[in-house]
Image: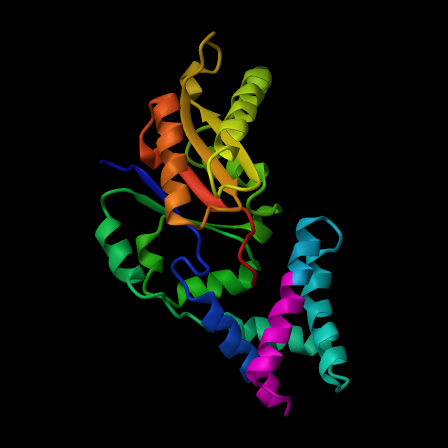
């Protein structure tokens, strides 16, 4: 099967974010004479996840998240630390953590030259750019799409609209009703697949057919709770390719909850 484009998330897909978060946090805690044990790291991860969830619900601002998570951590572990300084040091330290998951480099080297490679990731721009640039992966990728830099969160529809537009494919306003019908139908069908959970779908049509009565689907992006499960992804891809007769390379399936940075 031939693929023309491959989209990769960064964290815990190619880069080991769990290790990066642990090492960066511990380094910052140790430099302040604070406990850097497993309990503290687990506590921070829980606090951090909570703040990112609030951001995704529109209940807080990104700039606030950067410092408030450390303010909550200091309240929980006792000392009156400076959350602004901690946030600055943590972002700088995290940006230097470039640990790859096993097999990531070999996979990208195998795909390079066979299709265009792109990163689509959620997170803080400076952190993600620095981490990615420090890996041996950077030369193999055409572009890196980062949610903060784009002004919208992955997996919002707006995020993928922007990504697809950069491939020269755009949704047309005059066909929104038909597009909505396709997306609603797919949500219903895909949601019936075991393990999918909550689901969102974006359908992109061929540019040349935007004015015709019958619109041909070019690509489909699916984000769902079960998007990180190999079997669930395979069933979704099979379903979408069967319905629209498109190649598996034009079906993107990702987990609904973004990675945290």
Q: Is residue 82 above or below residue 112?
A: below
Residue 46 inside the magenta-drawn segment = yes
Q: Position of residue 52 (x, y in %)?
A: 65, 58
Q: Quadrant of residue 69?
A: bottom right
Residue 19 shows up from this direction? yes
Q: Is residue 45 above or below residue 153?
A: below
- Residue at 74%, 55% in the rendered image: 60
The image's colour scheme reads rainbow
Q: In terms of depth relative to the viewer, which is nearer, 212 or 182?
A: 182
Q: Main secondary structure of the magenta part?
A: helix
- Residue at 53%, 57% in the rendered image: 259
Q: In terms of depth relative to the viewer, which is nearer, 229 or 209?
A: 229
Q: In terms of depth relative to the viewer, which is nearer, 152 or 43?
A: 43
* Viewport quadrant of the C terminus: bottom right
Q: Quadrant of residue 155?
A: top right
Q: Is residue 11 above or below residue 41?
A: above
Range covered by the magenta-colored residues: 28-49
Residue furthest out toward the bottom = 33
Q: Position of residue 165 (x, y in %)?
A: 48, 33
* Viewport quadrant of the N terminus: top left
Residue 34 inside the magenta-drawn segment = yes
- In the picture, measured across the screen, residue 106 lies left or right of residue 12, that is left
- Residue at 23%, 46% in the rendered image: 113
């Amino acid at each position: 099967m031939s693929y023309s484009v491959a989209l990769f998330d960064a964290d815990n897909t190619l880069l080991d974010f769990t290790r990066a978060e642990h090492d960066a946090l511990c380094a910052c805690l140790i430099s302040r004479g604070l406990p850097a044990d497993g309990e503290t790291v687990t506590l921070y991860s829980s606090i951090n996840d909570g703040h990112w969830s609030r951001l995704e619900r529109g209940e807080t601002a990104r700039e606030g998240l950067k410092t408030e998570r450390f303010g909550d951590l200091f309240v929980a572990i006792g000392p009156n630390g400076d959350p602004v300084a901690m946030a600055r040091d943590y972002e700088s330290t995290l940006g230097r953590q470039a640990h790859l998951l096993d097999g990531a480099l070999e996979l990208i080297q195998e795909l390079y030259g066979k299709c265009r490679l792109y990163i689509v990731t959620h997170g803080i721009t400076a952190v993600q750019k620095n981490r990615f640039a420090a890996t041996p992966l950077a030369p193999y990728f055409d572009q890196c799409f980062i949610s903060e830099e784009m002004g919208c969160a992955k997996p919002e529809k707006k995020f993928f609209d922007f990504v697809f537009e950069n491939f020269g494919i755009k949704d047309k306003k005059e066909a929104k009703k038909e597009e909505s019908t396709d997306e609603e139908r797919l949500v219903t069908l895909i949601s019936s697949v075991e393990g999918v959970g909550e689901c969102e779908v974006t359908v992109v049509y061929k540019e040349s057919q935007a004015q015709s009565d019958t619109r041909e689907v070019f690509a489909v992006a699916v984000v769902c709770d079960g998007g990180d499960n190999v079997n669930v992804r395979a069933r979704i891809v099979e379903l979408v390719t069967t319905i629209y007769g498109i190649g598996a390379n034009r079906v993107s399936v990702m987990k609904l909850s973004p990675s945290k940075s």
